[in-house]
Amino acid sequence: MHPSFIGKTKAGLYGDYVHKLNHYIGQLLDELERLGLKENTIMLFASDNGSQFVGTHPEEELQKTTNSRADDNDKIDDTYHRPNFTFRGTKWTAYLGGVRYA
């Protein structure tokens, strides 16, 4: 990831990635408007449901982040971004946190 996006959110590297994605989608929408194509363009953007992470933290390396509830129960506190909150579960589960994105 380009260094200009690192540390832009309080949700760690995953949040920074989402911020980067939003930035480039915004540039695409601006270009469609500049070209006069905005009114005749349908843009569909879909996610693949909930996050794989129970929690992310700005000071935690994404490679070390776990998606195991058992590993995270003791360390998740109010300093963590919980992307699926208030839903139980993560991606690859049948719980709402895995199949629904709030």
Image: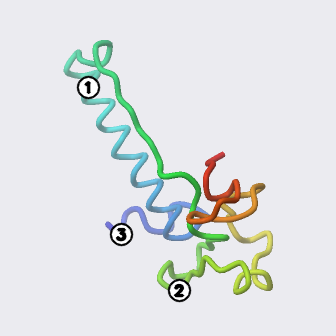
Name which quarter of the figure residue 35 lies in: top left
Q: Quadrant of the N terminus?
A: bottom left
Category of crowding for the residue at label 1, using alpha-carbon neighbours closer than 10 angstroms: few (below 14), some (14–19), many (at least 20): some
Comparing marks 2 and 3, which lies closer to the viewer? 2
Can you identify the residue that label 1 sits on? 32
Coordinates of residue 40 in the picture (x, y in percent): 28, 13
Question: In this picture, is 9 found above or below 48?
Answer: below
Q: Amino acid at mark 1?
A: Leu
Q: CA distance from mark 3 to mark 1?
A: 27 Å
Number of other residues with Cα within 10 Å of mark 3, as a class: few under 14, some 14 to 19, many 20 or more: few
- Structural distance between the alpha carbons of marks 2 and 3: 19 Å
Q: Quadrant of residue 53?
A: bottom right
- Residue type, numbered disc 3: Pro
Q: What residue does disc 3 label? A: 3
Mark 2 and 3 residues: CB-CB less than 8 Å, in contact?
A: no
Q: Which residue is at 50% across, 78% downward?
A: 62
Disc 1 element: helix
- Going by the numbered disc 2, the residue's amino acid type is Lys
Image x and y of residue 90, in percent = 63, 65
Q: Is residue 83 left or right of residue 77?
A: left
Q: Quadrant of the C terminus?
A: top right
Q: Which residue is mark 2?
A: 64
Who comes first in sequence, dot 3 or dot 1?
A: 3
Residue at the extreme left? 35
Q: Position of residue 91 (x, y in %)?
A: 57, 63
Q: Which tag, 2 or 3, sits closer to the chain's start?
A: 3
* Relative depth, front residue between 61 and 95: 95
